[in-house]
Amino acid sequence: MIHTRGLTRSFRTRGETVEAVRGLDIDIEAGSVVAFLGPNGAGKTTSLRMLTTLLPPSSGTAVVAGHDVVDDPAAVRHRIGYLGQGNSAGSNFRVTDELVTQGRAYGLRRSESRARAERLLTALELEGLAQRTVGTLSGGQRRRLDIAMALVHEPELLFLDEPTTGLDPHSRANIWEHVLRLHKELGTTVVFTTHYLEEADLWAERVMVVDHGRVIADGSPEQLKADLAGDRVTVGTADRADAARAVELARALPTVHEVTAEGTEVQVRAPHGDAQLPLLLRNLEAAGVRAITARLTRPTLDDVFLSLTGRTLRESTDATAPTTTRDGA
Ligand SMILES: Nc1ncnc2c1ncn2[C@@H]1O[C@H](COP(=O)(O)OP(=O)(O)OP(=O)(O)O)[C@@H](O)[C@H]1O
């Protein structure tokens, strides 16, 4: 669905060159849900703007939905939907009119455009608001209308640039529920950007971690966390002498990434921590070292970013998101 090779984009600003995207080589399968995750200024929006034909690349190639973004931008635009960071609907118009007009702009007959507008308003639970003017909608309702606008021509591929930024946790969960239902029902490929770790972790099948204009890691959230971060096993001991012996025993465990001690507490970073923890406890007991506390912590995508860059995403990003869970709680 998306194939890029050596895609770059730089900007000249105040006599300086900013290399926003420094060589994107990606292949995205049809029907997948992919997140671009990275801090402010990483190059996520610039990448999306090139893939959606809004910005010409400085070099490299991109084929999106079967067409080259430079040679045939109109064909690409016909096959994709794009939700930018700003609102796309005009605030003085009625919700239903905005959708019908959008459909007409894509060449649909009025009757077809009306039928699709109705279907989308129902699918996105906006039907009760059809006659309202856009300016009277709440932030979450407006974002859902933006999504409907991006879907009116039934694109195969939907790009969402920070679809939930600034919304409350309930509205964020609600937006995702709708997007993922459309993805399931219509098989729409979804590519989204976010700096909200939780959203990438929960909703994406594949995460591309972007930093300084490059993809620095690419895989399923589970795979990235297992390969690059690992679980964290923490064991509390009675005194520093026991902690020092526990460090030695922990280092002898199979496939351990890192062992550190702080006071009487020993931390082990390793894949499959659930299997390593009982093994470590048995080895400690056999060596006469008393474990007082033990806990296992699963890694987050922030741990992945930290192990890749030495920085946390939270440090690198202004945005802070309230935690979202799969059931939207
Ligand atoms: N039109 C422009 N002129 C000059 N520099 C630009 C322009 N657009 C983007 N940049 C710069 O390119 C870099 C990448 O920006 P981009 O918006 O792609 O990042 P991002 O990952 O989407 O960030 P955010 O999460 O804050 O939206 C930044 O350093 C940004 O300042």
Image (spheres, grey):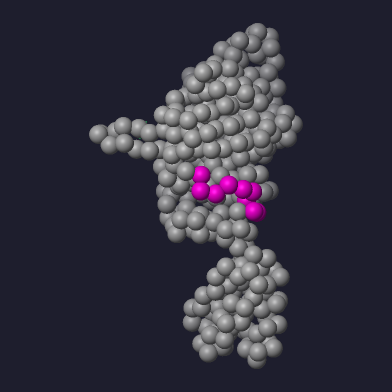
User: Which residue does the image show at 70% across and 82% down from the upper left?
Assistant: 282
User: Which residue does the image show at 64% across and 53% down from the upper left?
Assistant: 223
User: Which residue does the image show at 61% across and 10% down from the upper left?
Assistant: 107
252 magenta-colored:
no
67 up-or-down from 11: above or below: above
Q: Along the line of sight, which residue is nearer the eye, 213 or 37?
A: 213
Residue 142's quadrant in the figure? top right
Q: Along the line of sight, which residue is nearer the eye, 207 or 145?
A: 207
User: Which residue does the image show at 71% across and 76% down from the upper left?
Assistant: 278
Quick check: can you spot residue 143?
no
Q: Along the line of sight, which residue is nearer the eye, 209 or 132?
A: 209
156 up-or-down from 197: above or below: above
251 up-or-down from 182: above or below: below
Most distant residue in the left direction: 15
Q: Where is residue 219 in the image (x, y as percent from the top left)?
A: 62, 48
Write down the region rendered in magenta: 215-223
Quick check: can you spot residue 194?
yes
Residue 234's quadrant in the figure? bottom right
Q: Where is residue 205 in the image (x, y as percent from the top left)?
A: 66, 44
Q: Position of residue 112 (x, y in %)?
A: 69, 12
Q: Tell me the quarter of the image containing the N terminus.
A: top right
Residue 235's quadrant in the figure? bottom right
Disc count in the image? 0
Q: Where is residue 143 in the image (x, y as percent from the top left)?
A: 55, 32
